[in-house]
Amino acid sequence: MTKYVLISFVALLLTSCFPVMRVSMKTQKKYPPLESDSQFVIYNKPQQIPIDYETLGKMELICNNELTIKSDTTKCDSISVFHAAESKAREIGGNALLITKHKKPTTWNSYYFLNAKVLKVFDFSSPPDLLYKTYGKGTWDLRLSIPYINHFNLKPEGEGNVSNAGFWGISLGFDYYHKNTQYLSMIVGGVMDYFLPVLMGVDYDYGEEIDERENNSSVFIGLTNNHKINSFSLGYGLSYSRNFWNLLYNGGYNPDGTYEILPPNKRYADNTLGLMFTSYWHTKKGFSLGVIYRPSFFRLNTTPTFKYEHLISVDLAWRIRLKTVQKQK
C-alpha cells in the first residue's frame, strides 16, 4: 500500500511541474489600451525606431520551470514569451518593444529572460532618427571637420576689397544638446585659400618674370545655437576671428644666375567680431556636409572700426559621440 502511495505522490509532482512566467513593469506614462488587432512592432536596435515615438516604461520578463500544484499551460519558448510581453505592453497603450536584453534557456540556465522598453510609436512611416536615436538633452559630441572650400572677402588697409577662394582648413568643436532638437556648438579652427585641392609642395621662386602671389587665411572661434530638423540643422551665433592677407612677390630669375630686386611683400592682419551661421546635412553614420557663413563687422585693431568682411566655407565634418543621453519626449 505504501509503495502505491509513494508512486502516486511522485507522479503528482511530475505532472505538476509547469513553467511560471513573471512580468514586472516600471511605467512612466500610460495611454488607452491597444486593441488586439492594432499594429505592434518589435525592434532589436535603437536605430530602427521611427523618429516620432515616446518611451512609456521598462519591462522585465522571466519564465522559469517551477513546481506548482496549479494547472498552467504557459510555455518557456520564444512565442509564449514575446506574446506575453506584447500583451503587457498593449495594456498601457504601447505598440512597440525595443529589446535591450534577451537570454534564452541553456544547458546551465533553465529560465528565459527578456528586458525591453515599451514604446508608443505615433507614426511608423516616419524615418528612423539620426545618430542611432541616442541624442537628447545632455548628449555630447566631438566634431572634427575640414573646411575644404573657402571664399574670403577682406578689406586690408589701403588695398580696397580683396576677394579670393581656395582650399583646406581644419577645425575642432564640441556639441552639447541642451534640448532634444537643439545643441550648442563651440568651434575653433583655421582656414586658408591654398590654390590646389590636394596638398602638395610647390616651388614659387622659379621663373624669369616677377609674379605676385596673394593668399588669405583666418583663425577663429565660434559659438552657435543649432536647431535640428530631421536630417538638417541650422545654426546661428557669434564669432571672433583673426584674418590675414599677404601679397608676396617671387621670380625675377636672370639667366646669369642673379635675381631682380623684388618689391617689398605686403602683410595685413585684423581682429574682428561678427556673426556665424551654419547649415548642415547629417547622415546616419556621423558624417555631415555643411556651409559656414562668417560675416564680421567690428574690427578691434584697425580703422575704420566698422567694416564688412566675410568667410564662406564648405565644411566636411565627422561627429564622435562622447556621452549619450537617450532622447525623451
Image (cartoon, rainbow, N blue to C red):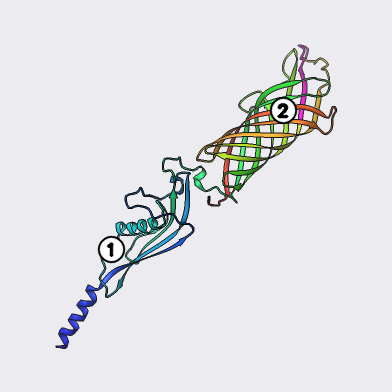
Mark 1 residue type: Lys
Q: Is residue 244 magenta?
A: yes
The residue singled out by tag 2 in the image is 310
Which residue appears at 60% of the width and 47% of the height?
Answer: 179
Left or right of residue 280, residue 122 in this image: left
Give residue 50's quadrant in the image: top left
Give coordinates of residue 69: x percent, y percent.
Answer: 27, 75
Q: Is residue 102 left or right of residue 266?
A: left
Judge the density around disc 1: few (<14), some (14-19), many (≥20) Cα neighbours within 10 Å: some
Please name whichever residue, 295 or 251, is drawn nearer the observer in this view of the structure: 295
What secondary structure is marked by label 1?
loop
- Please report the bounds of the magenta region as a residue range: 243-256
Residue 162 is inside the magenta segment: no
Of residues 298 and 52, the one nearer the viewer is 52
Report the residue that reaches farthest toward the bottom: 1
Q: Which mark is residue 75?
A: 1
Q: Quadrant of the N terminus?
A: bottom left
Instruction: Find the residue positioned furthest to the right.
Output: 303
Residue 295's label in the rendered image is none
Crowding around mark 2 (Cα neighbors within 10 Å: few <14, some 14 to 19, many 20+) is some
Can you give x and y, in whole percent of width and height, for residue 174 in the image?
Answer: 64, 44
| Residue shown at 54% from the left, 41% from the top | 286
Residue sitting nearer the eye, 314 or 88: 88
Q: Residue 149: in sight, yes or no?
A: yes
Occupied quadrant, residue 99: bottom left
- Res. 202 visible in picture: no
- Comes first in the chain, label 2 or label 1: 1
Q: Amino acid at mark 2?
A: His
Residue at image position (44%, 52%) is: 119
The answer to whether residue 247 is above or below residue 125 is above
| Secondary structure state at the residue bearing disc 2 | strand
